[in-house]
Amino acid sequence: MTKNDKFTIIYVKERNLIVARCMEVDVVSQGKTMKSAKKNIKEAISSYIERFVADGTSH
């Protein structure tokens, strides 16, 4: 798994936030706008990959 892999992201509007969930690695983030939700989920996935996969551990 690398940062260049494609991931499935589900976006759901909940009250005044947009919640983003990555299905492959079970990472969740949120934002007040779709733009910020997309930015935040990309950062969350990147952090997940750097922290767990790069160290040789998995989900």
Image (cartoon, rainbow, N blue to C red):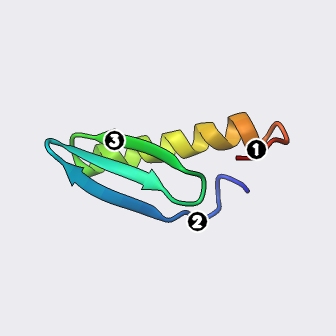
Left-right relation of 58 to 31? right
Where is residue 56 drawn, in percent x and y?
85, 42
Per the image, the residue denoted by label 1 is: 53
Badge 1: residue crowd in 10 Å (few <14, some 14–19, many ≥20): some
Is tag 2's residue or tag 3's residue first in the polypeptide sequence? 2
Q: Residue reaching furthest right?
A: 56
**Which residue type carries mark 2?**
Lys
- SS for callout 3: strand
Tell me the mark number nearer the camera, choosing from 2 and 3: 3
- SS for callout 1: helix
Task: Please tell me whether residue 58 is drawn above or below residue 50 in the rendered image.
Answer: below
**Which residue type carries mark 3?**
Gln
Task: Please tell me whether residue 13 is drawn above or below residue 40 in the rendered image.
Answer: below
Is tag 1's residue or tag 3's residue first in the polypeptide sequence? 3
- The one nearer the camera, 45 or 13, is 13
| Residue at x-position 55% and y-position 63% | 7
Where is residue 23 drawn, in percent x and y?
52, 60
- The one nearer the camera, 27 or 4, is 27
Q: Residue reaching furthest left?
A: 15
Badge 2: residue crowd in 10 Å (few <14, some 14–19, many ≥20): few
Q: In which quarter of the image is residue 6?
A: bottom right
Where is residue 10 drawn, in percent x and y?
39, 61
Per the image, the residue denoted by label 2 is: 6
Is tag 2's residue or tag 1's residue first in the polypeptide sequence? 2
Report how far apart the C-alphas of labels 2 and 3 lie in the structure: 19 Å
Quadrant where the N terminus sits is: bottom right
